[in-house]
Amino acid sequence: MKYKLPVKANFMLAFTCEFTSWLTSYDMLRARNKVTNFSEAPTLRSPPATVLSPELLSAFPDANTRQWLTVEGILVNHKADPAGGNKSNVTIIGAIRHNVNFFTWLPGAKADLEHLASNGWLLKVGGLAKYYPFEIHKKLAAAPRGHRITLVGRFLRNPLGHPRNWFEIWDLEIGFSPAQEEMYAALKEPVEISFPSLEIRKLGSFLRWFGLRLELQGLAGDSRLDFEAKGCTIGRLIDRIARALGSNW
């Protein structure tokens, strides 16, 4: 009999430590309730009106973060959490450094979330396992790095845990890279020009003023063009010229 109490105490201590370690991966869900109606989760077809950057979330974690949010940043990396295995970590950068941890739940977390919902966490995670898009990690895996990304989801502030600031991703959309954004901005610039006779090489010099380098394949540089444009974007102008000459650009 004298050995039973220490054995039972050691077992309970070991079990408590193991359960606490397992629960750490879901600790951010114990924070004060943010959004509970998961059946009305947003998508980028109907994104939340509040648009924030990662650094704004980081600087003002308790302001305007109690509802679904839209966040914009640059996608750097995406990988499974080596510690827990129940979520994937997504590295998003903004204009300056921040401490928000972006993540998606992996399919393996569904059973755990259902277990938590049936054992006292119903108000925190009830409906999360049913409505969360667990295959979203595949969309992230195929996304190009270094491109602008728009996310919708919810911010989970865990003031007593570490890390404290989490963002649970529900939908995402990949946009241009910074270089592509720069080119797109130049191509959509409206122009009003008239060239009765212009060498193609001089057209290239004109476009370099807008940060564009033009190459029309299969044409001599001294070929001459006669064109004018009014209220037309540079992109459409170049496309019309290339089509008229039967060339790619």
Image (cartoon, grey):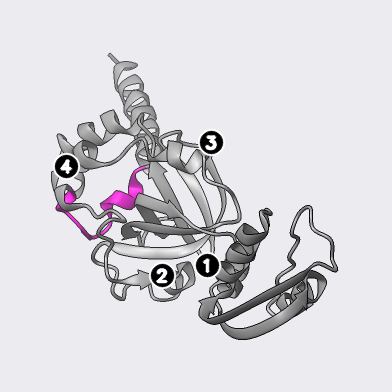
Q: Are marks 4 and 1 in contact (CB under 8 Å)?
A: no
Mark before the other along the chain sequence, 2 or 1: 2
Q: Quadrant of the N terminus?
A: top left
**Could you give the CA–CA distance between mark 2 and mark 3, rounded to whole angstroms?**
25 Å
Q: Amino acid at mark 3?
A: Pro
Dominant secondary-structure state across the stretch colored magenta: loop
* Tags 3 and 1 touching, CB below 8 Å: no
- Spatial distance from mark 2 to mark 1, Cα to Cα? 8 Å
Q: Is residue 184 visible?
A: yes
7 up-or-down from 30: above or below? above
Residue corresponding to mark 3: 82
Tell me, for residue 57, which label it has, or none. 2
How far separated are the C-alphas under marks 3 and 1? Answer: 22 Å
In this view, the residue in front, 208 or 70, is 208
Assign a secondary structure to mark 4: loop
The span from disc 4 to disc 1 (Cα, nearest Å) is: 30 Å
- Label 1 amino acid? His
Circles 3 and 4, Cβ within 8 Å, touching? The answer is: no
Disc 1 residue crowd, few under 14, some 14–19, many 20+, Cα 10 Å? some
Residue extent of the magenta highlight: 26-38
Task: Tell me the residue at 62%/67% (across/down).
Answer: 238
The structure residue drawn at horizontal position 14% and vertical position 52%, both measured from the top left corner, is 37
**Element at badge 3?**
loop
